[in-house]
Amino acid sequence: MKKNLFGTLGQLVRGNAVIIILALATVAAGALSFRTIKDINHRLDNQQLPPSAEIEQPPADSAEPQPAQDVQNQAENVPLKPKATAKPKATAAPKAQTDSEEETANSAEGIAVENSEETDKFVLPVDGKIITAFSGDELVYNLTMGDWRTHNGIDIKASKDTAVKACCDGTVKKVYNDGMLGWVVEIETGDFTTRYCGLAQKVFVKQGDIIKQGDSIGLVDEIPLESATDSHLHLEIVKNGNYQNPDEYLKK
């Protein structure tokens, strides 16, 4: 009977060998894990934290609140109190205006300016009243031609053969006969040219002559362009190529 019992156990052991091995391995693993955990706990229990007195405390001063700072001023390195600025330097006195600059400034302000030096250069070439004024850019009716046109000078009433005097000092630039203006004498003085129109053919001067103000240059005759108007002298003043109003320059 014992033999049968051991035989039966032997067969069971041989048949379940794998299961037994796995069971033993599981038990061994559990024992190993338990031991490992126990060792770890032991080590943790043996470790001691340093006494609370030994923990380094921050300095007492650091606990005090810091005064607020002007971050913007600090960033820009600008002092909170402005420094006294340097006393401004005195500027030079304004430069005196020239006559032309003064004239321009006064004209811009609507002030009528009369240049006495230029006015003194000119006198009336004949004694008489102005019967036709300077028109500038405005068209006026011409009785002789029967049309509208500009009048580039002034007409001074004077009978034929009246002596014509030079308005100013200068040099005779031209003497010529114009089909519309009759005989013409041009006298140049600086930037100005005075043009005497409607003279008799026999003039008293020639090109290149030096003329003094008041010298006789010819006699009043007829102006073809203005023959329908009373006898007169047609006078033009040109400055830098532009017609001027002679009445503004003549000293009466």
Image (cartoon, rainbow, N blue to C red):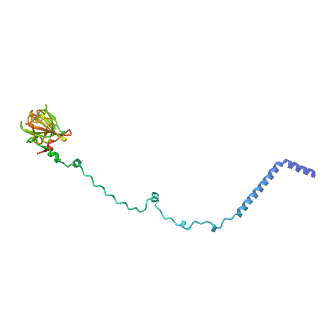
Residue 197 placement (x, y as % from top left): 12, 36
In depth, the one of 125 and 222 nearer the eye is: 125
Q: In the figure, is residue 172 to the left or right of 24?
A: left
Residue 222 picture location, percent across and down: 9, 34
Q: Position of residue 213 (x, y in %)?
A: 12, 42
- Say which residue appears at 81% left-offset and 53% top-offset: 24
Residues 53 and 199: in front is 199
Q: What is the x, y in percent for residue 208?
A: 15, 36
Residue lying at 80% horizontally and 50% vertically, measured from the top left: 22
Of 146 and 171, nearer the camera is 171
Q: Quadrant of residue 27?
A: bottom right
Residue 150 location, quadrant: top left
Q: Could you say which is closer to the camera, residue 153 or residue 218?
A: 218
Q: Quadrant of the C terminus?
A: top left
- Count of residue discs: 0
> Does residue 68 sit above or below 105 in this rendering?
below
Q: Residue at x 92, y 50 (%)?
A: 4
Quadrant of res 72: bottom left
Residue at the extreme top = 179
